[in-house]
Image: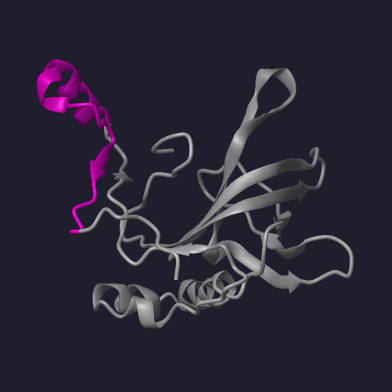
Amino acid sequence: MYDARTPMSKVGEFFLVQREGVSVEIACDGLPKLKASSGILYLTTLRIVFVATPPKALDHGAEFKSFEFSLSKIEDEKFNQPIFGANNLGGTLHPTQGMGLTVDARFKLFFKQGGAGTLLPLFFRALLDARRGGAQSIAEAIQAGRFASMAVADPSDPSVVYLTQPDIPVATEVSADEVDAEDDHPDAAGDDKGARRRNNGGANGPTNL
């Protein structure tokens, strides 16, 4: 995490949408169901990140702070509109390296405030790009300055769209040799071990359409 509300970025990743007023349920066989009743959803070209606000206390002093859904690992996705209860996006998440997930997880993201006409088209398009693994239509549109024309403006959807990319660090792996070198030269290491700041010419964050 970059701060209490914002995830670190990944190399080659572009932020698309930020949505507040979201809750989540995650269930894995043999494990207690993980829930958070309030949080922020971030959609990028590579993943969904749910950030619990505030973090939820779990057993044994642990906290549920955030959860990452890699788009390339999602299957059986479905947008549900029940007669009773909030609209939700459900699916199956296959094990993801580095997430400590060793079995499939079934998830639902609940949209408790407003519609999803802005978020959903971008989610399904990013999902298609992730599955194709080749040409990335959204990433190409962002780099060409055409992303605004792809985003659907739904007045009932409180999602905000990143028309410019946020100026946040990109998480990078640091080798043992690099850590030793930084320890030997603390003044040169700075405050961002294992991260570098994006230089993208814009730091305005998400924008309401």
Report whether 84 appears left or right of 167: right
Q: Nearer the viewer, residue 70 or 169?
A: 169
Q: Nearer the viewer, residue 136 or 154?
A: 154
Q: Split into 4 quadrants, where in the image is the N terminus?
A: top left
Which stretch did the figure color magenta?
A: 176-201
What count of labels does the image hold? 0
Residue 31 occupies which quadrant of the picture? Answer: top right
Q: Is residue 135 visible?
A: no
Residue 17 in picture, x, y percent from top left? 47, 62
Residue 102 located within the stretch drawn in magenta? no
Q: Split into 4 quadrants, where in the image is the C terminus?
A: bottom left
Residue 47 in picture, x, y percent from top left? 50, 59
Q: Is residue 99 above or below residue 74?
A: above
Q: Nearer the viewer, residue 116 or 195?
A: 116
Q: Residue at x 51, y 74 (%)?
A: 122
Q: Nearer the viewer, residue 110 or 128?
A: 110
Q: Residue at x 70, y 62 (%)?
A: 92
Residue 101 occupies which quadrant of the picture? Answer: top right
Residue furthest out toward the right: 84
Residue 64 occupies which quadrant of the picture? Answer: top right
Q: Is residue 165 visible?
A: yes
Q: Is residue 73 above or below residue 198?
A: below
Residue 189 located within the stretch drawn in magenta? yes
Q: Residue at x 27, y 28 (%)?
A: 176
Q: Residue at x 76, y 47 (%)?
A: 28
Residue 91 in picture, x, y percent from top left? 71, 64
Residue furthest out toward the front: 155
